[in-house]
Amino acid sequence: MTNEMISIRPANSADIESIADFNIALCQETEGRELDRATVLEGVRRFVAEPSRGRYFVATIDGEVVGQTAHTFEWSDWRNGEIWWIQSVYVHPHFRSKGVFRALFNHIKELAEADADCCGIRLYMERDNDSARSSYQRLGFSETGYEVFELLFR
């Protein structure tokens, strides 16, 4: 844990550029791909403006945004409840291994446990991201038998 105080708060419109920059860095680090900044900016702008899509949270130290994550909603008819999907996890390289993601995750977990409709939390990650896998396992996540498939149109 870092000596500096980590604060977690909901993202707001002033955080959009930082979140977009972090998402672009995340894609570059995990997939080796470049994202179009204008598209990412508009996507983050819409996400922050439309809370029914999900919520971003940012971690700050001394007012500086040093990490982020978001969650989206999936209705599970099997469980008669919502599953919250964690996504867009990014911690600035200078602040890694200092408890930033743990603080973000704990914040979301507390909100999820207090929400009567929420029945669990899931996430997906790049298959070969061993560092992320270890982090998620330390937080209590277990691997499932599910695989993710997609059909993208854009």
Image (cartoon, helix red, strand yellow):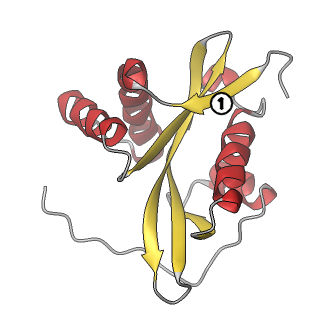
Q: What residue sits 77% from the left and 56% below the top? A: 139
Q: What residue sits 69% from the left and 30% below the top? A: 96
Above or below, 46 against 130 in this view is above
In the image, residue 132 lies at what x, y percent?
64, 51
Quadrant of the rendered structure where residue 119 is?
bottom right
Q: Is residue 7 visible?
A: yes
Identify the residue at the far top of this view: 62
Quadrant in the picture for the N terminus: top right
In the image, residue 60 lies at what x, y percent?
63, 21
Check disc 1 and give the amino acid type: Ile
In the image, residue 10 lies at what x, y percent?
53, 33
Above or below, 40 against 105 in this view is above
Q: Using residue 82 as the reference point, say whether residue 110 is left or right of it.
A: right
Quadrant of the rendered structure where residue 27 is?
top left
Q: Is residue 125 visible?
A: no
Identify the residue at the far front of this view: 116
Q: What residue sits 68% from the left and 23% below the top? A: 95
Query: How many numbered marks, from 0 up?
Result: 1
- Between residue 116 and residue 123, name the one nearer to us: 116
Quadrant in the picture for the C terminus: bottom left
Report which residue position mark 1 lands on: 8
